[in-house]
Image (cartoon, helix red, strand yellow):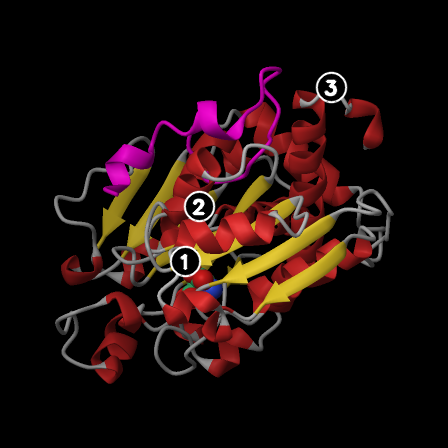
Amino acid sequence: MHIAALHQPSQVQLNQQGNLKHFLTIEGLSKESLTKILDTAQSFLDENNNLINRPLLEGLTVMNLFFENSTRTRTTFEAAAKRLSANVLNIDIARSSTSKGETLRDTLWNLEAMAADIFVVRHSSSGAAHFIAKDVCPNVAIINAGDGRHAHPTQAMLDMLTIRRETKKPFEQLSVAIIGDIKHSRVARSNVAALQTLGCKDIRVIAPNTLLPVGFNEYGEHVRLFNQMNGGVTDCDVIIALRIQNERIDSPALASQSEFYKMYGLNKERLALAKPDCIVMHPGPMNRGVEIDSSVADGDQSVILKQVTNGIAVRMAVLALAMQGQLQEQGLIEAISL
Ligand code: ASP
């Protein structure tokens, strides 16, 4: 499916009352919907950043379906579901019958018959989560855990929660730089959409031309392109460094990784150009010495590990809200009250 065809998803992911019933992409969701996710996630964290358990999904079953590798996303979805008291099944796709030629649709129908309430899906094809939400599971909530280079909406929301908690400034007042492989990154795409929706007016994309989407203009309002680090990071409040997505690049987009580090690696000297309280983020996995220097990744301004904890809170929020939306659609809303 072409990425452009995925940009009218609101009918699919919202119920008749306008609440979330699947979480597929940021596009099409309002500022109020995104703020509700952030506020709900916040309610699962205490003032010391400790997670608070709530048995909101007791008796329900969450199935993790990861057709592509993952460490943080899969584990934090599992942790989130357990903290909500759901039953969690991690389906071992590499050993499943899809490797014996069964279609995705048949695999899903079988899993549905095992009484799944939520599928958390990661897939290398852009559009996989939309396909499943539309065609396969009418009463099951689908959460997109990353589809190809299209979207990674829970990563975007955990990044927004981290920015909100760590900068303590309204999005309207922030300058945010995203550096690296923009072209192949679902994180860049979802983060730009979330920042725009939440009101950020200064979004800077820093990359060589080979790592930008063809005919760079698809990100729209308030997004500026920089080919140089120095102008791009100056006076920023937030810097997000991204990994080069080698698994999605067919022909070499770079002379070498060391050349990239020389031009775009986030080191202390470049970070010093940003505001003194600028925070440094990275969705992981990090390639130290390529997009980020260890002194920055492990330095005082880094909030990279806080992103991981916030990821559990955001995934708890999304699981609970999507299930609430599904039950609301079925007239069973009293089952979850947040
Ligand atoms: N973990 C993020 C993703 O799944 C970022 C990355 O892989 O570089 O897209």
* Tag 3: amino acid: Gly
Distance in Å between CA atoms under marks 3 and 2? 25 Å
Q: Is residue 243 left or right of residue 22?
A: left
* Tag 2: amino acid: Ala
Nearer-N-terminus badge (3/1): 1
Image-quarter location of ligand 1: bottom left
Where is mark 3, residue-wise? 331
The answer to whether the residue labelled 1 contacts the one labelled 2, judged by CB atoms less than 8 Å apart, is yes
Residue farthest to the top? 17
Foreground residue among 305 and 173: 305
Where is mark 2, residue-wise? 129
Q: Quadrant of residue 178?
A: bottom left
The residue stretch that appears in magenta: 1-27
Please tell me the numbered disc located at residue 10: none
Q: From the image, which quarter does the C terminus lie in? A: top right
Nearer-N-terminus badge (3/2): 2
